[in-house]
Amino acid sequence: MKHFLLALLFVIGCRLALADEPNLKLTVDGVTYSDVTFGAVTPYAVKIRHSTGIASIPLAKLSPDLQQRFDYDPQKAADFYQKSQAQEAAARVQADAAYKRSQQIAARQELIAKSKAGTIVVAGQILQISPNGAYISDAFTTRSYQVREEIPPQPNHTLMEGERTFVTRTQSENIRVTVEGEPIFVIGAGNGLIDGADWQGRIYPAGRHRYNSVGGSVKTVLCFATSPEAAADYLLKNR
């Protein structure tokens, strides 16, 4: 029992010795902190709360007695600092990657919306099939519009003054998607078909497509895709 009491008194004495002094001031690199209270300690630094806020002070900058109080070891401090810096660098890389992904997702959604707004239905003939799509020649789309026409009066029918009869008719016309003789490239088109086959489908604008002609020169044609997602992905890839 006597030994237990002595041990207890020793522990209490140590804790009292480690307790923060009232109105403690701490000067580090010419900056004086007042009413300092020590907080969490790592092998490299100690957190302090002071009269105007919170700070982290490297143990290497403390007085020898405080270094002893916080078990300062230069090698452990260096190892901890290097490890924490590596972790912070990895966290920054992850944060940057997450930000870029969010930006790409937002940009893709915007492009998908634009592609949906510009969608058309076309018909044409497959000029050549490639691994990721097909060149379509003589591509055209059909535009429908309404015409209001006046109906002539029936024989032996006398019209009242100002009386006129009209009818609205729906007409359509074929409009070329591009200039005559120039194909378009449609991503995702031509599956299961051969060159020369007729093709028809809904397409979504995807900018322009570059290809090498038979003569070796680089040419560009209008590019479309069979889905707005594929159009957006192509535009992002070829920005």
Image (cartoon, rainbow, N blue to C red):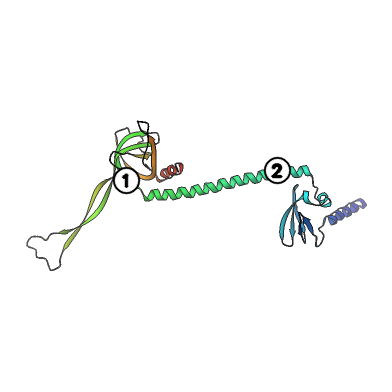
Q: Is residue 41 visible?
A: no
Ranked by sequence position, the earlier of labels 2 and 1 is 2
Left/right placement of residue 139 relative to residue 211 reads left
In the rendered image, residue 85, in percent from the top left (x then y), is placed at 68, 45
Q: Residue furthest right?
A: 2
Q: Are marks 2 and 1 in contact (CB under 8 Å)?
A: no
Question: Is any atom of residue 76 visible in this view?
Answer: yes
Q: Quadrant of the C terminus?
A: top left
- Residue at the limit of the structure toward the top, as seen here: 215
Q: Dot 1 corresponds to which residue? A: 121
Name the spot of residue 16 as percent of width and height, x first: 85, 57
Q: Residue at x 35, y 48 (%)?
A: 119
SS at mark 2?
Answer: helix
Residue, disc 2 = 82
Q: Is residue 230 left or right of residue 54?
A: left
Could you tell me residue 144's position as x and y percent?
26, 51
Camera-near label (2 vs 1) is 2
Q: Amino acid at mark 1?
A: Val
Q: Residues within 10 Å of mark 1 (few under 14, many from 20)?
A: some
Q: Classify 159 as above or below 97.
A: below
- Hey, what amino acid is under mark 2? Gln
- Identify which residue is drawn at 24% across, 49% down: 172
Q: Residue at x 34, y 44 (%)?
A: 202
Where does the image place residue 112, in percent across and percent down from the top left? 42, 48
Q: Residue furthest bottom?
A: 161
Write the residue at 46% across / 47% down: 108
Q: Quadrant of residue 194?
A: top left
The quarter holding residue 21 reads: bottom right
**Which element type, helix, strand or loop, lies under badge 1?**
strand
